[in-house]
Image (cartoon, grey):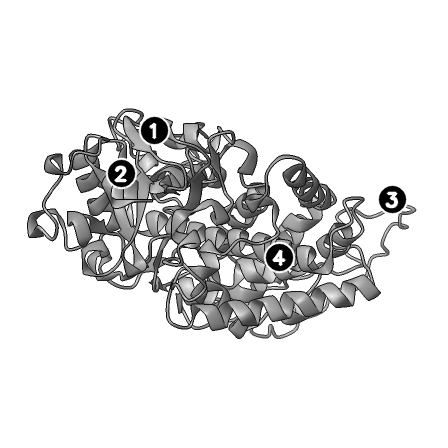
Amino acid sequence: MTSESHSPTGTDDPTLGPPPGCPAHGLGPGGLHRLYGPEAEDLGALYEKLRAEHGAVAPVLLHNDVPIWVVLGHGENLHMVSTPQHYARDSRLWTAVQDGTAGADHPLAPHIAWQPICSHAEGDEHLRLRGAVTGAMSTIDFRSLRRYINRATQRLVNEFCELGKADLVGQFAEHLPMSVLCEILGMPEDYNDRMVHATRDLLKGTETAIASNEYVMGVLTQHTLRRRANPEEDFTSHLINHPARLTDDEVAQHLRLVLLAAYEATANLIANVLRMVLTDPRFRAQLNGGQMTVPEAVEQSLWDEPPFSAVLGYFAKQETELGGRRIRKGDGLLFGIAPGNVDPRVRPDLAANMQGNRSHLAFGGGPHECPGQDIGRAIADVGVDALLLRLPDTELDCKEDELRWRASMSSRHLVELPVTFAPRPPQDVMQRPSVNALPRQRPNWQVTTEASEPSPAPQPVAPQAPPTPEPAARLGAWQRFLRWWRGY
């Protein structure tokens, strides 16, 4: 992408753009705004500023001041992801990769580098690779998966339910998706704190992102070799044994794709839904009153706070036009999910309820639409519902404006979500969640008794003095329930 293609009018006339280094137009070369650093601390506000200045497609700078377009319009984003003849996911087409300005040492290298995965492929190769992924996903039993999600939720809640307080990000939202995904991939033994932290870190563009990526890939590569030698009934084995005949490297890279996309998106989604429940009385009232289900609450969150705010990237295969801007061959474009979801042309009233409307951009669209979105939805739906059933009196343990966020170009997530609730005992993870743990039923407990032969008439006996009454012992709750149930 060349700097002259950043003219606000889409022409090459430099007199029509801001002078280089003009403070009024940002700190980057050519007066372009940066999507990193101090100016990008509030990306939502920056996107709206860019929309006001440039319209639906705006020129910006990535780390190391690499120029790129960010697509802000809802319709423009859908057009870009749905026209593979004009825009591809193959980063090798990007001018910045070809000239080395976005090379292997770039902070966003894990996002940028081309990989042998379906989301970077086109044509027949895309069909082969994506067919293997969707084929392996079709073997997932979602009924069993939901039962596992419930059990995993109970295990996590059991770790803090007796304390009466918790951090629902660090102790719940960050761990539930990883636990479930490791189970789906057939590697539950690899679920641990290091896997959780490395997976989150490699998406942030930090100094340690490349090392974190190497750790995750090492784990997934070893798992691929294990399953190649000893297949089982899990996603990885089905991916390996698919007729597409993926290589070990292709299998490991697709495991990384599924793990990263589903984990980060679902962890953010769970935290966002819980935050809305705890901070918006209307939202909580709708859930408690039955006007909104947890799945509907999840969809509302996908509109208002999509787990991924932007995705890098799409790359122009030829010279074209988008949103009135001239896009040159080799230009890079950011898929702007968050700004597209609040495009005033499709959402003039952001307070309007979006129940039943799934036209948000949270899971992409076109040939590269997220194939694992149902997994993320299932984890969020079941996990949030089970948590709220166990701890219905959960309250935020700080002021709403004290909540802290960690943001990057690709996502924005809560640092922590401190809460309090009435302490409760752990529950059997095999039970359906409830406010109070249900005692196990006695195996010989019967509601009715069999009819018996009539007893003979009692014989009269001499009256006796009544015994001295003893103090009556107070019955426990379970005994009182049984007496009531049996009609005593």
Q: Secondary structure at mark 4?
A: helix
Judging by the rendered image, the residue that carries numbered circle 1 is 322
The mark nearer the N terminus, 3 or 4, is 4
Judging by the rendered image, the residue that carries numbered circle 2 is 5
Q: What is the C-alpha distance between the residues marked 2 and 4?
A: 34 Å
Q: What is the C-alpha distance between the residues marked 4 and 1?
A: 31 Å
In the rendered view, tell whether residue 471 sits above or below residue 33. below
The mark nearer the N terminus, 3 or 1, is 1
In the rendered view, tell whether residue 454 sits above or below residue 153. above
Residue 10 on image: x %, y %: 24, 31
* Mark 4: few/some/many CA within 10 Å (<14, 14-19, 20+): many
Name the mark on residue 451: 3
Q: Is residue 404 left or right of residue 175?
A: left
Q: Nearer the viewer, mark 2 or mark 1?
A: 2
* Mark 2: few/some/many CA within 10 Å (<14, 14-19, 20+): many
Q: Nearer the viewer, mark 2 or mark 3?
A: 2
Q: Nearer the viewer, mark 2 or mark 4?
A: 2
Q: Residue at x 30, y 31 (%)?
A: 326
Residues at circles 2 and 1 in contact by the CB criterion of under 8 Å? no
Q: What is the C-alpha distance between the residues marked 2 and 3?
A: 92 Å
The mark nearer the N terminus, 2 or 3, is 2
